[in-house]
Amino acid sequence: MEVVWALPERQVVVVLSLPAGSCVRDALHAARGEAGLVELGQGAAALGIFGRPVTAEQLLRDGDRVEIYRSLLADPKRRRRERAGGPGCGRSRR
């Protein structure tokens, strides 16, 4: 299994072997030690396994990829409207 964490400047991928019955919390703890990154996942907005939101108590299966999500800096819908010049961005449409 692996734990992945994407930062703006780099991506961290830690490959682990955990005993049966391990949960997401166990994987995060092991990945912090393996990668030597105390900050791994701290302040995370959410956790997931293959894009599906999970809690730290979720039991892991062989081959799972635990994903650590970070908060978005801006709302994607609002940013698209701003780029397109849509309502609410201060520019009028003709």
Image (cartoon, grey):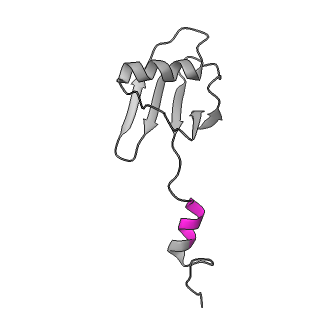
From the viewer's perspective, is 4 left or right of 92? left
Residue bounds of the magenta highlight: 75-81
x and y percentages locating residue 80 in the rendered image: 54, 67
Kindly tell me whether residue 1 is visible in this rendering: no
Q: Considering depth in this image, is 62 or 66 the residue closer to the camera? A: 66
x and y percentages locating residue 86 in the rendered image: 59, 77
Identity of the residue drawn at 40% across and 30% down: 13
Quadrant housing residue 24: top right
Q: In the image, is residue 84 above or below residue 72? A: below
Q: Considering depth in this image, is 14 or 36 the residue closer to the camera? A: 36
Q: In the image, is residue 13 above or below residue 86? A: above
Q: In the image, is residue 47 above or below residue 78? A: above
x and y percentages locating residue 27 in the rendered image: 51, 20
Quadrant housing residue 60: top right
From the viewer's perspective, is 84 left or right of 7? right
Identity of the residue drawn at 40% across and 19% down: 33
x and y percentages locating residue 41 in the rendered image: 48, 33
Identity of the residue drawn at 55% across and 17% down: 62
Q: In the image, is residue 25 above or below residue 48? A: above
Identity of the residue drawn at 51% across and 43% down: 70
Quick one: which residue is furthest to the bottom in this view? Answer: 94
